[in-house]
Image (cartoon, rainbow, N blue to C red):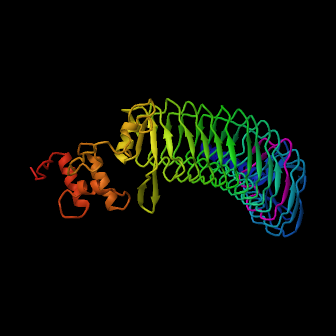
Amino acid sequence: MKKVVSLLLAFAAVSVLSSVYALNISAEKYGNFEYEVLSLSDKTCKITGYTGNEETLDIPQSINGLTVTALDDYSFQDYSDLKEINIPNTVTDIGSYAFWGCSGITDITIPDGVTSIGEEAFGYCYSLSNILLPKNLQAIGNSTFSSCVSLENIILPDGITETGDRLFENCTALESVELPDGIGAIGEYCFKNCGALKSVNIPQSVTAIGDFAFYNCTSLSGINIVSGLNSIGKSSFCYCGELKSISLPESVEKLGQSAFESCASLDFIKLSDNINTIPDRCFANCGSLKEAAMPKNLKSIGEYAFYNCPLLESVTLFDGITDIGSGAFLNCPSLKEITLPDSLKNIGANAFGYSKDGEAFKASDEFSLRSSSGGAAQSYAEENGFNFVDKNGSDQDPDQNPDQNPDKEPENPVKPKVKKGDVNGDGKITVTDAKWVLQSVCNLRQLNDEQIKAAKVNSDSKITVADAKWILQIVVGLRDENTLLLK
């Protein structure tokens, strides 16, 4: 019985103490402010909420003998009446979403005691045009100023080492930003849709620019990148329509997919020699691009990397490159000739010499490839019906050997017999002949009289898909190339 009584008394004591403790740390009211005790020993508290409707708000330094050191998460969220706020210098932390959606605030000064600002703390403060950040600020969360559409300029203090993702996303009026020398990375989507931003100096301390960092910064005409930068993320400068030239320091080793896609004014690029891969669509739709200085250590060019660059006239590729992806230079009509190194092993479909109209691909009659005989370049030229010039001076170059010039009539011309199926006239029937037939059917290739005779394999007096089918049957041994009968 004594043990039971002792246990009951102990339980009651614990309950009383717990109630007292909970009373001391639970949310309390101080005028229109709600607060919680952070530490009784340190005599500190944090603001957790506000129920008033004042336009100008002075946050107290202390409440009932407790120093206010923090503004809690969501503490003033959606307080649309608020236009001016004064934060005491006792505050060190501003929580996530603390002033999110306070659409009436026009400017704010954050005291130097603040070292941390949480994510989206000032997100969607539509009227905020000016904010002074504290010199002791060390941490700033993701999307802290996202969609502050009236914010015009900002200076990040020296203590910031990275921007966080989406920090100024959709700040459409932001014209200038100063990044500190110690910053190591620019986060993903950091300045996305900052349409008024005109120029940015990237400090030497920055090693990485995140994905979509400057996406759709339509007024960005200049960006100064110094040595130190190692990587540029995907779509990081996509749709920067005023960006005119880019020169990347040798420290850059990696580019992301679509990094400079649709930079309509970009007319010159100088890439770091330490870049091994130009990824898919990296410079696609750069309508003003005329010259591309390629890296000396380049190994591969991705699919559609320079797609639809109509003014691109000159591309120099160095020995060492092995792969060029499909459509890499599709819709580049000003690129009439390109010299390919002997190291090249793989060339994707429609990589050179083609234009695209809707879903159809059309081969250019003017395009030619220069390379050594017997390599991937010659195979691509023959398969697609392009002129091939042996850069070592063999007789395949009509300018070097007049006797092989197809435009020169022989002294005693002997008209060769047309061989059914040998459309390209190379003396053999291959898949290329079938391809030429299909291109003719789709109005992508114009055949001469001899080629038309060779293409009409089934003798029905017209060129159709059936002729291509017969040629393929010959290639795989299902149809005799002499009798044209099925075996």
Residue 301, visible in the rendered structure: no
Residue 451 in picture, x, y percent from top left: 28, 54
Residue 454 in picture, x, y percent from top left: 24, 53
Direction left: furthest residue: 487
Q: As rendered, which of 197 and 349 lies closer to the eye?
A: 349
Residue 373 in picture, x, y percent from top left: 38, 32
Residue 278 in picture, x, y percent from top left: 54, 40
**Vertical placement of 358 versus 428: above or below?**
below
Q: As rendered, which of 8 and 333 lies closer to the eye?
A: 333
In the picture, which quadrant includes the N terminus?
A: top right
Q: As rendered, which of 158 and 305 lies closer to the eye?
A: 305
Q: How many marks?
A: 0
Q: As rendered, which of 358 and 449 lies closer to the eye?
A: 449
Residue 123 among magenta residues: yes
Residue 353 among magenta residues: no
Residue drawn at x 53%, y 43% is 279
The answer to which quarter of the image holds residue 115 is top right
* Left or right: 234, with 341 as reference point: right
Residue 419, visible in the rendered structure: yes
* Left or right: 188, with 16 as reference point: left
Residue drawn at x 29%, y 57% is 449
| Main SS category, magenta section | loop
**Vertical placement of 29 versus 335: above or below?**
below
Residue span colored magenta: 115-139
